[in-house]
Amino acid sequence: MKKYSSPPIGIIGLGAMGGAMAKILIKGGYNVLGFDIDAKKNINLKRAGGQIAASHQDIFESSEISISSLPSPQALFQTANKVELKNSSGARPIVIETSTLSISDKQTAYSLFAEIGIELLDCPLSGTGAQAALGDLAVFGSGDKPAFDLCLPVLRTVSHTQHFLGEFGNGSRMKIVANLLIASHNVAAAEAFVLGVSAGLEPQLIYDVISTSAATSRMFEIRGPLMVSEEYNTATMKMDLWQKDLEIIGAYAQKLGVHAPLFEASTKLYNEGIAQGRDKQDTASVRAVLEEISNENRKKIKTEV
């Protein structure tokens, strides 16, 4: 195993979120050691001033604190299964697990990492890849409090707000609540643009006025510019990736017996976006989905008249 000049912060998964956090940490003066199965992402980290790990094993044996940002529960499970730490009398390595996964998958991962001597924290993030690049994230942390406190300097570097929410899994519970609101707020913003434009208002004027009024929301402010420009191909959250989050929310609400009519109505529109071939577009393209439905409604009205 290669020796590093100081204990680096490990980054497992260098996608939109992990790669952005790696760069923020490097700018913040941290020694960053990253690994991704995509060689191009490893090269991007090296160009940013980070170091490329030989494997997950290398990260866990070199880093006291690591961040994982992975696309699926299988990727997280495989990370644990590929590691066998040597017996050590030192403190257990800590992994800040930031992926959006079901609570049951997080619990499985917690057990897998505990078996190899690693303390896993459940710390999903609120924000997009673009926000991550600016350190404009909120952390929903849960798990071992002393371990979370040790990670606070790192978390403060990559986020503007760090919440500790108690027992392991509460972070993911809060992320489900947040994503339910995001799903509905994004559709509400799109609906407002479609109504306003249909009434003869300019999209930019709608954004400028509403974003400074009591009617605004964070989703209106973040996705509104994309809805104004109708440029959806540079995605901060792709429609197909968003489907995973929608499934997690829906399954959890169903498990708890929660009636969520606004969420269910919003989900139908995202599904319609997929059916229209918008799977790689930003979720802001739900405005285009509503435009198409509205155009069909207008045709019916003209036919009836």
Image (cartoon, rainbow, N blue to C red):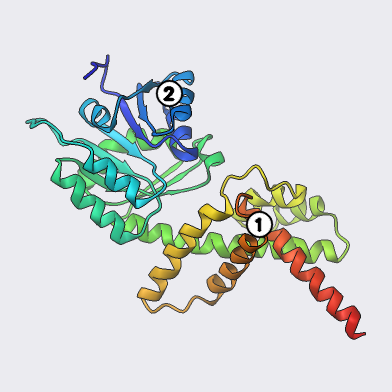
How many C-alpha atoms fall within 10 Å of the one at disc 1: few (<14), some, or many (≥20)? few
Q: Can the viewer see residue 168?
A: no
- Outermost residue on the right side: it is 305
Dot 2 amino acid type = Ile
Q: Position of residue 93 (x, y in %)?
A: 20, 35
Name the residue rendered at 51%, 52% in the picture.
241
Image quarter for residue 161?
Answer: top left
- Across the whole image, how many numbered discs are drawn on residues? 2
**As drawn, is 132 to the left or to the right of 173?**
right
Name the residue rendered at 51%, 59% in the picture.
243
Circle 2 — which element? helix
Residue nearest the viewer, comparing 1 with 114 = 1
**152 versus 296 height, above or below:** above
Name the residue rendered at 32%, 55% in the picture.
165
**As drawn, is 260 to the left or to the right of 218?**
left
Classify the position of the C terminus by image quarter: bottom right
Task: Look at mark 1 in the image and give the residue it sits on.
Answer: 277
Q: Position of residue 191 (x, y in %)?
A: 71, 65
Q: Can the viewer see residue 102?
A: yes
